Image (cartoon, rainbow, N blue to C red):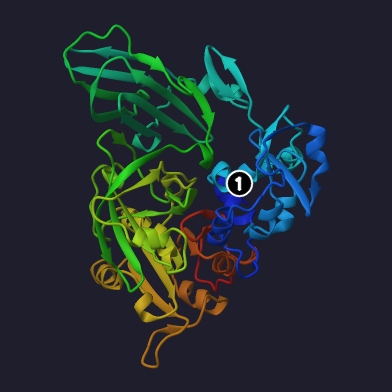
């Protein structure tokens, strides 16, 4: 049985390796922020910062006295234990030791310095033994280290691949332009792989390759216009990044290296780059869900591949809050250029929670306001659709968002014979884009949509209930032709667990499941689906 995403990926860890617990009343993230602002002594040291030895750190390993090292800084996390969404026991796994690896495996995108700054005890005298090392090895994860390779910095585990994907770059100029050329030796390279940020004379180019990225990061020698263009020559594995000079002067060199220049880094959500994006429009798509359009800065070039997500970041009361969202299209009928990948606008469909930490802020954004948007991440690749002739999509609430691009992309492929969508919501007013879905079903006979409500009004004539085997079985039965089927599920964890269920050997279905907004995980069985009843 194949696995998607791969074991050890941040998406799989986020979706399957972290179990939220029911916290006591008054123990939300906002309650924690209020506590940190109360001037209470959170460390027990009355404001003193100390140097902590490995022996001293190991003494503080109880729930009543819990210290932890994260990235060389030691925190007294005792007061935070009751506020930890994953529960006290999960946090205690790093008690009295270096919890950096554990922290990064579960939520590397969280800013620990911001979240725990009032709990700072001091700095480690020397790097402690990592409690997470054994756990990481059990998960198949490699602990990174930096070693030189032909003058280029590479992470541990990369050497075996270096002969195949070792990159090099050069540059040339005309009177008006600068062109940076990256040679990848990969003939399947396309704009999916490339992210460029040009801001205030600093150029950062990232070429993402599975687990690793190649980075060019330079402070340019002279001024350029904050506009970039990118051309990928896939047949020869070449990427060209073109810049426009602000003044027609001859450059003697490209610029001064910045962090990670000409190096390979391991892809983690914690290492994502962010850029400020401007809100262009905001419209209601339901009583509590908005469709927001953000404009990328002029010096930014990135792609939003099908099935991938981004993070929004905002500082709230001096605490950095980060949340993941799946970019969508402006409508189901959008015809994006370059296959729907290259973009200058990012559309997000976001449900507003009145007691949420980030969504009330998002709802109050005015046209022209800015938010920090990360680079896209995710393991899903459109190559997984090769040979597929039928899609069965099950979405709960805003779990519909990852399906939007998938539907749009798949209907452009003549190989698909059927695309079936099951939309699960509480009430009829919660259904988003219902008019568009119904219109699409009437125009393209390959597409079908079924609405299932858990709390319908008395006049509702459609299906009722939550996700259950009988509903799923009814939706996938009655086919008379042989189809290669991909089953996609996205919604809250409880929803995906019920939809996927345990492996059923009598049913041959390829599929993957997802975690709401928008992490994807999987339960895959390879084969063809014939006329049969499905229990998965």
**Label 1 packing within 10 angstroms: few (<14), some (14-19), many (20+):** many
**Whether residue 360 is situated above or below residue 96 in the rendered picture:** below
Percent coordinates x, y for residue 300 in the rendering: 30, 35
Q: How many marks?
A: 1
User: Which corner quadrant holds the C terminus?
Assistant: bottom right
When asked about the image quadrant of residue 443, the answer is bottom left
Picture coordinates of residue 40, whole percent (x, y): 63, 53
Measured along the vertical axis of the image, is residue 110 above or below residue 87? above
Give whichever of 360, 490 is nearer the camera: 360
**Which quadrant holds residue 388?**
bottom left
**Which residue is denoted by mark 1 in the rendering?**
118
**Which residue is found at the position 36% from the left and 58% from the top?**
362
User: Can see residue 2?
Assistant: no
Callout 1: helix, strand or loop?
helix
**What residue appears at the point 24 percent right and 20 percent down from the top-left corner?**
223
Of the pair 416 and 14, the residue shown nearer to us = 14
Q: Residue furthest bottom?
A: 458
Residue 41's spot in the image, x, y percent?
66, 50
Where is residue 525 drawn, in percent x and y?
Answer: 58, 57
């Amino acid at each position: 049985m194949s696995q998607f995403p791969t074991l050890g990926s941040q998406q799989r860890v986020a979706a399957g390796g972290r179990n939220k617990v029911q916290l006591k009343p008054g123990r939300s993230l906002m309650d924690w922020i209020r506590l940190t602002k109360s001037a209470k002594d959170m460390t027990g040291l009355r404001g003193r910062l100390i140097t902590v030895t490995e022996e001293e750190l190991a003494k503080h390993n109880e729930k009543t006295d819990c210290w932890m090292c994260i990235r060389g800084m030691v925190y007294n996390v005792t007061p935070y234990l009751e506020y930890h969404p994953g529960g006290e026991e999960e946090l205690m796994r790093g008690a009295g030791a270096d919890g950096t690896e554990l922290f990064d495996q579960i939520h590397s995108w969280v800013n620990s310095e911001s979240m725990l700054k009032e709990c700072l005890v001091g700095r480690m005298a020397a790097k402690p033994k990592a409690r997470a090392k054994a756990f990481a090895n059990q998960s198949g994860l490699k602990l990174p280290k930096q070693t030189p390779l032909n003058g280029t910095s590479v992470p541990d585990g990369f050497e075996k691949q270096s002969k195949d994907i070792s990159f090099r770059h050069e540059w040339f100029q005309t009177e008006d332009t600068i062109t940076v050329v990256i040679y990848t030796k990969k003939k399947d390279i396309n704009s999916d792989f490339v992210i460029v940020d040009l801001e205030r004379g600093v150029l950062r180019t990232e070429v993402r390759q599975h687990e690793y990225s190649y980075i060019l990061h330079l402070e340019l020698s002279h001024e350029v216009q904050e506009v970039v263009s990118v051309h990928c020559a896939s047949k020869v594995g070449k990427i060209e990044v073109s810049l426009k000079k602000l003044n027609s002067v001859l450059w003697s060199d490209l610029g001064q290296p910045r962090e990670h220049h000409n190096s390979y880094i391991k892809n983690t959500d914690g290492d994502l780059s962010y850029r400020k994006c401007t809100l262009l429009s905001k419209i209601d798509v339901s009583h509590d869900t908005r469709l927001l359009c953000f404009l990328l800065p002029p010096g930014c070039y990135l792609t939003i591949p099908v099935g991938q997500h981004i993070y929004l970041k905002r500082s709230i009361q001096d605490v950095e809050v980060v949340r993941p969202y799946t970019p969508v299209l402006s409508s189901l009928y959008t015809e994006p250029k370059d296959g729907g990948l290259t973009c200058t606008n990012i559309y997000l469909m976001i449900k507003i929670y009145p007691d949420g930490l980030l969504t009330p802020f998002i709802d109050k954004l005015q046209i022209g306001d800015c938010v920090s948007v990360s680079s896209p991440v995710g393991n899903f690749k459109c190559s997984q659709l090769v040979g597929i002739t039928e899609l069965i999509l099950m979405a709960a609430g805003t779990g519909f968002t990852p399906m939007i691009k998938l539907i749009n992309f798949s209907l452009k492929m003549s190989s698909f014979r059927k695309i079936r969508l099951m939309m699960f919501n509480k009430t009829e007013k919660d259904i988003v884009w219902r008019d568009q879905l119904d219109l699409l079903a009437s125009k393209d006979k390959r597409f079908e949509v079924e609405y299932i409500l858990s709390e319908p009004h008395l006049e509702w004539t459609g299906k009722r209930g939550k996700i259950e085997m009988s509903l799923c079985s009814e939706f996938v039965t009655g086919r008379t032709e042989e189809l290669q089927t991909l089953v996609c599920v996205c919604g809250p964890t409880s929803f995906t667990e019920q939809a996927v269920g345990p492996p059923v050997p009598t049913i041959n279905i390829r599929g993957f499941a997802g975690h709401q907004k928008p992490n994807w995980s999987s339960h895959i069985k390879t084969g063809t689906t014939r006329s049969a009843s499905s229990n998965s």
